[in-house]
Structure formats: structure tokens, C-alpha cells
């Protein structure tokens, strides 16, 4: 029995490939290449930005996080539950656990962050899956290399979660309760509902979201930037944790694990995944912290070919990460005036009276991968 348990715990978790493809999970976690070049872009204002960011430069003294830190990269693919293909690397979160202090933090990395990708050059960080496929590289290893070069955080493990798995996870635990800071009215393509479009309408205040609603909530571009979306993602992650910690939530763990294991893509073995879950659940809420790489940690910039990207402010990011365990809880709302509830619809040219926002699929309907 002991030998069987040992083999079970040491077995790889989830599917072997991600269709982009991710290397087989049965292999050992990929070793990242030694750091040789780190992104050192000079900070500029949007109005005074040069035609192209400065080339990468070597850091004189790369940051060295404490050895007690264990860092896990979580990659969220914005892929419709009814669609095929790789999807977009739309959500990037680094979970940091400090075994010495008992604190943990989540760092949300914007998908438009302008980074140096080895053997490719300067580009947005969310193109890494496509670049990895073209270069025939391991996507998780490439993500880890770029995160380490950009943030100075070595990645110990990586997990890929797609939209369908996220929805099912929320439904398995019976929904997630969150505090909605501002009213939201939005709509998304979804071929599972009549008309092909699902409506998101939430009032401010406490709300319990099912899987599809939670997925729309974390993907909506409601607000002035993607940074609000990052905070909503952190809030939902915290809400999932709190739901499992409720009196009946522990009874859901076996079913939740079965759901996760059959669709998760990771380079972790079972005992590593279970240990990660244990640490996340055992942490005191007062020792959980959230950080979003929003201005002044990043600066808006237009590239020569018209891309809207975010340049990393290296010194500011280093200081913020060093102070991670003094940051507020994940998903903490910022004191600011709420934008109009239908801000996302207006941003994409669909006012509240536009029939496309109510489920009619026209020839120019926007793609769900927003």
C-alpha cells in the first residue's frame, strides 16, 4: 500500500499537453536557462515616449528574493468553453509563498507588459504561447524565464488554467461570494446560450457568482484599464479559497480535485499540487496580500507599429515586490469613482441600446478573446 501511495503522489497531474503544445507533465519541471539578460527599459511618459523602447540591458545587481520564497506561475487562457485551440494567455499571476514568515502574496502581471523574450525580442508577454510554438520551446519554461528576467522571481512551478476549467471549479464549490465595487453591464459571446451572447449585469455590493458569471466578471474590461480586471481576478481567487474553508466546503475537496486533475496542465506532481493547495488553505487571511503591476509600476507606451503596451518600471517593481507582504489583501478595491456600468460596452462600440449587447449576433460581433 505504501509503494502504491508513493507512486500515486509522485505521478504527474492533469493532461499531458496544452495544444500549443506544452511538454508532457510526466517530465521533470523544466530547468530555466541561466539569467543572462534582463529587461531594463528606460521609463518614459506616454507623451514623450520614443518610437521604440530602449533595448534590454544587463542588470548590475539582479534582485535576489529570500530562499524561503516559493513561486508558482498561474497562466489563465481566455478560451471559450465551446472553442478549440490554444486561446490567449490572458491572465498571469505569480503566487508567492514564504515558508519563513507564513505570508503569501499574488502578483498580477498585465498581459500587455512589454518584455524581452529570448530568441524573439521585445513583445507583449501574452504572445509567449505563440512564440514558444514557433520556436519549438517549452511554453511554461519560456514563461518562467521571462518572469524571472522581468520581475527577478525564479518560478518553481507553473499551472495553466483555461476558462472552461475555471467555470467548472466555481460551480463545483457552489459559487463564489464577492464584493462587487461598481455596477457592471457587459456581454460576451457564448454559443451555449440562445442568441450566442451571454449578458453580465451586476449591482454594487455582495454577490454570489456561478461559474459562467464569475468567468465574465474576471474577463470584463469594465473600467479605465485592465488593472481593475486584475483586482477582480484576485478577489475571485480569494473568494474561492474562502468558499472551500467554509464548514461544508471541505467535503467538496475530493470532487474539486477530480475536476482539477483531469483538465489541469502543470509541471507539478500530485504531492506538489496537494502541498500547494494545503499551504493556500492553511494561511491566515491576514497574511494574504495582493499586488497589481499598475502605474507607477508600469508606464503606458505606444510602439512604433501602434501597439499599446506597458513598460516595466524596474526599480519601482523591485521595491513593490520586496514590500509584497505589506500590501493590502488580494483584490482590495481602490477608492475611486465608479465608471459607467456599461463602460466596457461603450469602449467596444456597443452602447446599452445596441442589439448586439442583448444577444444578437451580427457579422461584426466582437470576439470573446478581448
Image: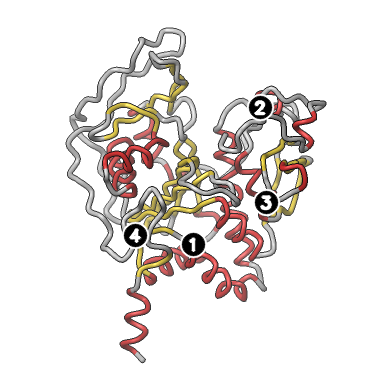
Q: Which residue is mark 2?
A: 364
Q: Nearer the viewer, mark 2 or mark 1?
A: 2
Q: 323 or 18: nearer the eye?
A: 18
Q: What is the quadrant of the N terminus in the image?
A: bottom left
Q: Which residue is mark 1?
A: 263
Check contact, mark 2 vs mark 4: CB within 8 A: no
Q: 370 or 31: nearer the eye?
A: 370
Give the residue at x 73% y 54%: 208
Q: CA distance from mark 1 to mark 3?
A: 17 Å
Give the residue at x 34% y 44%: 143
Question: Reading the chain from its start, which is encountered first: label 1 or label 3?
Answer: 3
Q: Which residue is mark 3?
A: 212
Colour approach in the figure = secondary structure
Relative to residue 142, is residue 228 drawn left or right?
right
Q: Which residue is mark 4?
A: 267
**Image spot of residue 114 (x, y percent):** 38, 28
Crowd class of label 3 (few under 14; some 14 to 19; many from 20; radius 10 Å): many
Question: Reading the chain from its start, which is encountered first: label 4 or label 3?
Answer: 3
Q: In the picture, residue 18 is in which quadrant?
A: bottom left
Amino acid at each position: 500500500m505504501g509503494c502504491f501511495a508513493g507512486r500515486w503522489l509522485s505521478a504527474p497531474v492533469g493532461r499531458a499537453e496544452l495544444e500549443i503544445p506544452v511538454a508532457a507533465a510526466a517530465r521533470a519541471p523544466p530547468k530555466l536557462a541561466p539569467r543572462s539578460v534582463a529587461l531594463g527599459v528606460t521609463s518614459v511618459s506616454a507623451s514623450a515616449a520614443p518610437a521604440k523602447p530602449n533595448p534590454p540591458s544587463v542588470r548590475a545587481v539582479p534582485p535576489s528574493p529570500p530562499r524561503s520564497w516559493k513561486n508558482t506561475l498561474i497562466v489563465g487562457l481566455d478560451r471559450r468553453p465551446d472553442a478549440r485551440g490554444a486561446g490567449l494567455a490572458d491572465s498571469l499571476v505569480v503566487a508567492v509563498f514564504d515558508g519563513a514568515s507564513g505570508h503569501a502574496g499574488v502578483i498580477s502581471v498585465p498581459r500587455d507588459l512589454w518584455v524581452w523574450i529570448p530568441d524573439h525580442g521585445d513583445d507583449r508577454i501574452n504572445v509567449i504561447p505563440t512564440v514558444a510554438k514557433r520556436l519549438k520551446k517549452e511554453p511554461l519554461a519560456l514563461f518562467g524565464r521571462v518572469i524571472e528576467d522581468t520581475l527577478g522571481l525564479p518560478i518553481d512551478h507553473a499551472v495553466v488554467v483555461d476558462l472552461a476549467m475555471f467555470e467548472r471549479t466555481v460551480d463545483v464549490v457552489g459559487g463564489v461570494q464577492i464584493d462587487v465595487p461598481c455596477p457592471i453591464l457587459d456581454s460576451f459571446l457564448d454559443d451555449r446560450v440562445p442568441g450566442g451572447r451571454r449578458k453580465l449585469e451586476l449591482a454594487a455590493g455582495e454577490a454570489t457568482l456561478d461559474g459562467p458569471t464569475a468567468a465574465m466578471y474576471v474577463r470584463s474590461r469594465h473600467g479605465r484599464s485592465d488593472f481593475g480586471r486584475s483586482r477582480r481576478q484576485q478577489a475571485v481567487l480569494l473568494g474561492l479559497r474562502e468558499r472551500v474553508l467554509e464548514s461544508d466546503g471541505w467535503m467538496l475537496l475530493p470532487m474539486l480535485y477530480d475536476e482539477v486533475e483531469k483538465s489541469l496542465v502543470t509541471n507539478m506532481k500530485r504531492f506538489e499540487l496537494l502541498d500547494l493547495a494545503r499551504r493556500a488553505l492553511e494561511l491566515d487571511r491576514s497574511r494574504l496580500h495582493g499586488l497589481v503591476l499598475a502605474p507607477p509600476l508600469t508606464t503606458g507606451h505606444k510602439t512604433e507599429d501602434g501597439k499599446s503596451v506597458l513598460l516595466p518600471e524596474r526599480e519601482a517593481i523591485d521595491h513593490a515586490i520586496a514590500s509584497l507582504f505589506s500590501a493590502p489583501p488580494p483584490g482590495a478595491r481602490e477608492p475611486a469613482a465608479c465608471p459607467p456600468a456599461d463602460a466596457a460596452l461603450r469602449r467596444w462600440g456597443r452602447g446599452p441600446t445596441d442589439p448586439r449587447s442583448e444577444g444578437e449576433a451580427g457579422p461584426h460581433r466582437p470576439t470573446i478573446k478581448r
